[in-house]
Amino acid sequence: MNKFTALFQPSSIGTLRLANRLIMPAMGNRLCDAEGHVTERTLDYYRARARGGVGLIVTQLAAVSADTTLHGNFAVYDDECIPGLRRLAEAIHEHGVKVIVQLVNFGPLNLFNQVIPEGTSIKVPSLMPWMPDNKSYEEVNRNDIDRYVDDFSEAARRVKEAGIDGIEIHACHGCLVSAFLSPVLNRRTDEYGGSVENRTRFACRIIGAVKKKAGADFPVSVRFNCSDDVAGGVTPDEAVRQAVIMEAADADAISIAAGIEYWATLESACYSFPEGPLVPMTEKVKMAVGVPVITAAKIGPDLAEQLVEEGKADFIALGRPLLADPELPNKLREGRLEDVRWCLYCNNCLKVGSVGCSVNPFLWRESKFPPRPAEVPKKVIVVGGGLAGMQAAAILGQRGHHVSLYEKSSKLGGQWNIASAVPVKKGFASFTNYLKRSLDQYHVPVNLGTEVTKELVLEMKPDAVVVATGAIPKGLSVPGSMRHNVVQANDVISGEVEVKGKVVVIGGRFVGIEVAIWLAEQGKEVSLVTRGKLGGKKGPEEGLTYRTLVRRLIELRIPVYLNTPVLEIGEGSVIIDLSGEVFSLPADTVVLAVGAESDNELAEQLNGIIPEVYMIGDCVEPRDAAAATHEAAKLASRI
């Protein structure tokens, strides 16, 4: 029986009738070609979500102006975009799903992008002293505003001509329209700055121009920040006033977002946030406007059903959950919650150079799923029951190979079980459970408590061996590192050791930061020492989770010693080199979080004596879960 009846009731945005209340919001995917046009990979990506049963798809960002673009996103500033968008509309409509395109002028968002396309300019509402001095930018003048308003309307005309059902104005996260709305980014003294009404004027002019160009009945949604999540920015109370003004300007829907991308943490709330962090703000806006309100950010199905049923929101935007499982709406409709591949909100999909999603190895590679059946079934042994091993074994079984999985411990999950033991990461265990069900589904025998040796492999005579033996925590090569009070972060998280007294955590990666926070929240006096930057040797690869963790360090007043080598660990202290001076930090317990090293001994023993030996996951190189599962799926799809 389907308990999500409210979510699957039809409703409308303006003249646009939607089959249900679930929306795929705009998310960057870098699947366009160099000119910002639709590719086959773009179509595959959106087809998968349309087949999955959402009511509406809002496409990725589409640049309305040639002088402010971002590589990998749509370009809709000339008519060359129309044929590709028409193909996109047809591909999505084929599954009975509606589609709108999100239009954007990037503006200040380009200030912090690593690569700015040649020939583009960075336009901002106001010049600020904090703006980076290694990029050129200029304040928007009235002629620019007039031109950009016209660019939005012309983009809407092209989108409509392509058969798209409507548009959404990107007015959140610090883009140009968002920056005009924000008092912390807009310090203008003309008719576009100062009062709430003045700062909303640019957005309202865009709504009016789009309606005039594309037609009064052409649906227009506005996605805006109900909180900038920074001091001096837009507050929920002010956002309510802006929503009312934009409704009066003829917006057909208000979509709730939060956070200025280059400062805040709420833009894509990570695993440490509670469920539904934007819900209270959504309720305020919903009470003030008559048009439909769309909410988002870490909303599970039960909360989603409640919000729609109680009239606190009209539509639910599921972003990262639809990356994790494109079939999520269909599974909810059919009551198959046990089959859902749940999003972990780990934000690995947002990392610079990310290979994709931790739980969905076929994200951005939808044409590769489902993997083709094996031409010649082989006898395959998978050694290691962590994420990589389980993912590989499941896909090998799905393809028809005779596969068996061996794990030396008493349970599956490997290092992922430790990650799942962190209180704010309890949801991570859902992926282990999903992979276990996949192994059962494809009839993969699982052998626990069995350490695989070279002799055992020779005895079983497999055609191929997939080694996924993972990694082990690194130690620290300094005097005193073997003392009884020196423990590994993994053992602290798993509860295998007791942490006493004053604590020094050594290591500035996410694990070290998380352990320091966890212990401080228990009332421990904690210091954090790292020989480099916070977040890793080169700094963090993903900024939103990083900023969330650092904010918590600040709130808990945890001392952090950056670029500080450890010289020695004493009986009750850690000796550090702080800017060339030697200092002693009191430490009853020292927690090591200095990374991991690959365990690839078995693979080395088997090379040359087994026809096919493959290594995947951390035994190749310690990396994140997305890299491990992607590597596992890629290998399992070609054996």
Image: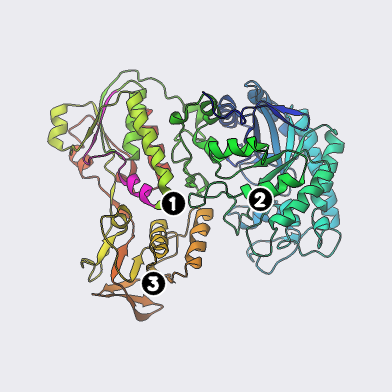
Q: Residue at x 68, y 37 (%)?
A: 314
135 relative to 295, above or below? below
Part of the protein shown in magenta: 402-422
Q: Residue at x 80, y 34 (%)?
A: 157
Disc 2, SS:
helix
| Amino acid beneath label 2 | Met
Residue 482 percent location from the top left of the image: 21, 66
Residue 407 percent location from the top left of the image: 24, 38
Mark 2 or 3, which is nearer the eye? 2
| Amino acid beneath label 3 | Thr
| Amino acid beneath label 1 | Val
Verify whether residue 416 appears in magenta: yes
Res. 462 in view: yes
Which residue in the structure is indicated by mark 1?
424
Rounded to the nearest whole Å, what is the CA distance between mark 2 and mark 1? 23 Å
Which residue in the structure is indicated by mark 3?
564
Which residue in the structure is indicated by mark 2?
281
